[in-house]
Image: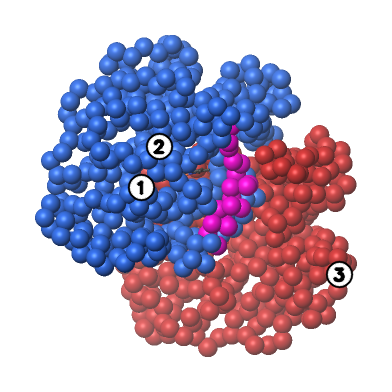
Chain colours: A blue, B red
Amino acid sequence: APDIPVDEGEAEEFLRACYSEVPKLGPVEPRINAVREQISAIGTYTHTKMELIHGARMAWRNASRCIGRVYWRSLVVLDRRSPRTPEQLFKDLVFHLEAATGDGDRRGNLRPIISIFGQAVPGRPITRIWNDQLIRYAGHDKDGGIVGDPRNLKLTRQATELGWQGKGSAFDLLPLIMQTGHAEPQLFELPETAVLEVPLAHPDLPWFAELGLRWHAVPAISNMRLSIGGVSYPLAPFSGWYMGTEIGARNLADASRYNQIPVIAQRMGLDTAKESTLWRDRALLELNRAVLWSFEKAGVRMTDHHTESRLFLTHVERELRAGRPAPADWTWIVPPMSGGITPVFHQYYAEADLRPNFYLDEQAQE
Amino acid sequence: APDIPVDEGEAEEFLRACYSEVPKLGPVEPRINAVREQISAIGTYTHTKMELIHGARMAWRNASRCIGRVYWRSLVVLDRRSPRTPEQLFKDLVFHLEAATGDGDRRGNLRPIISIFGQAVPGRPITRIWNDQLIRYAGHDKDGGIVGDPRNLKLTRQATELGWQGKGSAFDLLPLIMQTGHAEPQLFELPETAVLEVPLAHPDLPWFAELGLRWHAVPAISNMRLSIGGVSYPLAPFSGWYMGTEIGARNLADASRYNQIPVIAQRMGLDTAKESTLWRDRALLELNRAVLWSFEKAGVRMTDHHTESRLFLTHVERELRAGRPAPADWTWIVPPMSGGITPVFHQYYAEADLRPNFYLDEQAQE
Ligand code: HEM
Ligand code: HEM
């Protein structure tokens, strides 16, 4: 909470870790003294650019639910801390998506990026985004049932109340809803250039394309608070690339999301009367093949759960060799399909809440 | 440990729960007084038959890793507490397997059963079985690699040192190794009538049967200590029926077990050069279809992970309605394949170590 002064101990601990990991930053003692003085004077302190960059990378490294952490050093950090209007902020978010997506020849060659907006400061109103991810599909509550993503029903209703009109399709892009302090929330429509999408088809099943399924290339989480050395960054959207199962075994598969397993099973002509035919598993498998194949064909970077499991274990080994614990949450790390045949299944992990890190608060701007 | 007197508090707590759940047992106070006196006189006490039966059922109900607990009330309890020679004990184990398997028209119609042998008593030597399950396949360390189940390499070596000779096949049944106190361990070969096995074939892939895969019908865990009301039963083997994934997604699939995924993928003609073809998932799926189909065709009771997940949630609801917590370990309850599309994935569970329960000690007879 911005009204409580920054914890000096946490600041010091972060600075010591950061300066010891990045020797070119020089001696840490003078910096700790300066930060102490700043905290006692104004209740908080400001990170240098290098502290911000390395702190964000450490936060990713400590995200115990993330299987993609082998790449933590490659995180691109966009420093957006200076004050800006909602309009400028929106432009920065569009830039984030475009830079994450790549353009020209690099379009689809995704890069892990974080945009870090102003830190929480006592008394200063916070700008937040109501969308939990920058790219979200609307969920329309129609007579015959829900069209689109049921997860976003509420957000869709809010956007509609603010004047937004969807096309009523299953994949309507929601606008961003941005709010500064208690001011009226504002709507911003993402330009098409900012959102790369991949229509889904299947290498062996020609009818699959007729389902009209698609997904966007960039997963960009926008509702987590970044915490570095006791300082909170309430708005710090980050993005990497997808692991296929996130789309194929969750977003399009969950009964409470797009619920496509029964649809695909029916098109496959499977006997759905008996569970032991494993019709659900068969439909799930073809859906995931379609996701990986379509992204690959479209030249959009994506990883699969086997490759990423192996890379994650490499990451854990590397971290242990570097003398760091590599905390992990088994229930998130093990993929939602074929868990037992991925190597991450057969391991125990340390569980720890290390800082810097990302937090999902009741309200991210607390 | 048998040299420490039984915990009176635990005894009382168990008796109160047991007598309140089974009203026909009558008032609990006199019984608690009697048990107290017995503990202070000889350091332990003896369960009545009904306490033993209900206590064992409670232990199953509290087994937080078991997805099959909806059936807890149907556990058949064989009271084997009176002293017996290793030869008698072996006969009782054979009886257990036969009763669990069913015979004549009922063969394959498996029933959940537990055989409870003598309780731990200070100074009395304990008989234990080295096998972690009553039915285990040998692992032979041959020049070209391991034939059979690599998990049982050590047990196989021990049996061999005691004079056992396997046929050298991938599915040699190991003998039971039984030891009383520090006496010489003894070998007992299970008769064929005690072990029902199912050869695996596939509904659509004729070559599958040529792999020569098979598995036994009854999973009978023999290395867990049963703890009821402070009393330990070091030898209390229990058995139910299989969930298909235990065989198809673990025993035959794990790289450190039968490792059949690459073999099946090759027979399927899959492109194993690239993970993103999901060749592992495809082979895994066909293996699991084969398991469920073969058991069904053989008339051997087995459950699938979808059905059992739903039943487990029914169980949790029932327990909550009965005012009991239903502790569960997510990492064990969520099946090792298609986790995300089973309803158990999308739940949080209470974690608690409730007694009565089953424990895996360093040495089960402690
Ligand atoms: C580069 C490619 C990346 C891959 C393949 C990857 C993969 C994943 C996956 C599969 C999850 C679980 C998602 C779910 O089940 O909902 C996850 C969660 C997470 N990832 Fe990553 N990730 C990547 C990049 C990043 C980046 C750049 C950051 C931050 C800088 C990050 C931080 C996190 C966090 C904080 C979570 C937990 C989210 C939550 O609690 O809801 N990841 N990641
Ligand atoms: C009736 C059918 C049953 C089904 C379908 C079933 C299912 C399962 C499954 C799938 C597991 C996980 C096994 C693993 O991943 O290694 C398990 C574990 C377990 N089950 Fe059951 N079970 C059944 C009967 C029983 C019975 C009769 C008992 C005891 C009376 C029992 C007690 C346990 C215990 C203690 C574990 C944990 C074992 C360990 O820690 O290694 N189950 N069960």
**Residue B313 point in image, percent of width and height:** 48, 42
Dot 1 crowding, Cα within 10 Å, few <14, some 14–19, many 20+: many
Marks 2 and 3, Cα distance to the nearest angstrom? 53 Å
Establish if B289 lies above or below A158. Answer: below
Number of the label disc, if any, that sits on residue A221: 2
Tags 2 and 3 on a common chain? no
The quarter of the displayed image where residue B146 is located: bottom right
The quarter of the displayed image where residue A116 is located: top left
Establish if B318 lies above or below B183. Answer: above
Q: Is residue A309 magenta?
A: yes
Instruction: Left or right? Give the position of A318 relative to B134.
Output: left
Establish if B216 lies above or below B244. Answer: below
Please name the residue that numbered disc 3 is placed on: B143
* Residue plotted at (44% across, 58% down): A327
Which kind of residue does numbered mark 1 sit on? Phe
* Residue plotted at (77% across, 76% down): B157
Establish if B218 lies above or below A190. Answer: below
Marks 3 and 1, Cα distance to the nearest angstrom? 52 Å
**Quick check: marks 1 and 2 in contact, CB under 8 Å?**
yes
Please name the residue that numbered disc 1 is placed on: A358
Instruction: Note whether ligand 2 is within 8 Å of mark 3.
Output: no
**Residue A29 point in image, percent of width and height:** 26, 67
Instruction: Note whether ligand 1 is within 8 Å of mark 1.
Output: yes
* Closer to the camera in the image, B83 or A231: A231
SS assignment at label 2? strand
Count how many numbered circles sit on residues in the image.
3
* Residue plotted at (72% across, 86% down): B184
Instruction: Left or right? Give the position of A242 relative to B283.
Output: left
**What chain does badge 1 belong to?**
A
